[in-house]
Image (cartoon, rainbow, N blue to C red):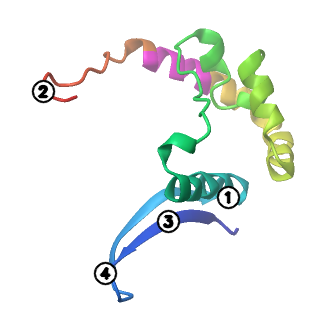
């Protein structure tokens, strides 16, 4: 199966000697998400941070409902599920249809995720870091 990745490569100026590779996203089965990330990076490099579009970050609130649908967000009720379904491409729709048959696995995994997140300690930044 073919997988795609978006990797930035830092080279020594004037040569093709690779100094560092930075993986922005990898192991994708479709290029749609990678193209949108590259568009965002390219826009940042050309126009600077002031002209970037606002990002809609997925809510990480710990709730039983959010946790149950953590592994199957396309079935989630509410605004988050509608937004996820709206941005799905053809490949994602086909995979969602194939994976729906594993609902009985994803739902208990979501319950385990809920328990793990409730039992996990709160993260905190060190005092001197800002």
Instruction: Name the front one of labels 4 and 3.
Output: 4
Q: In this view, does 102 lie to the left or right of 62?
A: right
Tag 4 residue = 12
Whether residue 25 is visible, yes or no, is yes
Q: Where is residue 120 in the image (x, y as percent from the top left)?
A: 36, 18
Q: Label 3: state its secondary structure.
A: strand
| Residue 83: quarter of image | top right
Q: Residue 128: which disc?
A: 2
Tag 1 residue = 35
The residues tagged by marks 1 and 2 sit, at their Cα atoms, a distance apart of 37 Å
Q: N-terminal of the two: label 4 or label 3?
A: 3
Magenta region: which residues?
A: 109-117
Q: N-terminal of the two: label 2 or label 4?
A: 4
Which of the image's four quarters has the N terminus?
bottom right
At horizontal 76% and vertical 24% (from top left) the residue drawn is: 81
The residues tagged by marks 1 and 3 sit, at their Cα atoms, a distance apart of 12 Å
| Residue 123: quarter of image | top left
At horizontal 63% and vertical 26% (from top left) the residue drawn is: 70
């Amino acid at each position: 199966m073919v997988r795609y990745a978006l990797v930035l490569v830092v080279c020594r100026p004037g040569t093709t000697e690779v100094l560092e590779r930075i993986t922005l996203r990898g192991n994708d089965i479709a290029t749609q998400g990678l193209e949108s990330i590259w568009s965002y990076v390219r826009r940042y490099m050309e126009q600077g941070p002031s002209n970037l579009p606002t990002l809609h970050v997925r809510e990480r609130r710990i709730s039983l409902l959010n946790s149950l649908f953590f592994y199957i967000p396309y079935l989630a009720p509410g605004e988050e599920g509608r937004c996820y379904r709206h941005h799905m491409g053809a490949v994602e729709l086909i995979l969602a249809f194939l994976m729906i048959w594993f609902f009985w696995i994803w739902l208990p995994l979501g319950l385990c995720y809920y328990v793990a997140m409730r039992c996990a300690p709160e993260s905190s930044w060190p005092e001197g870091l800002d």
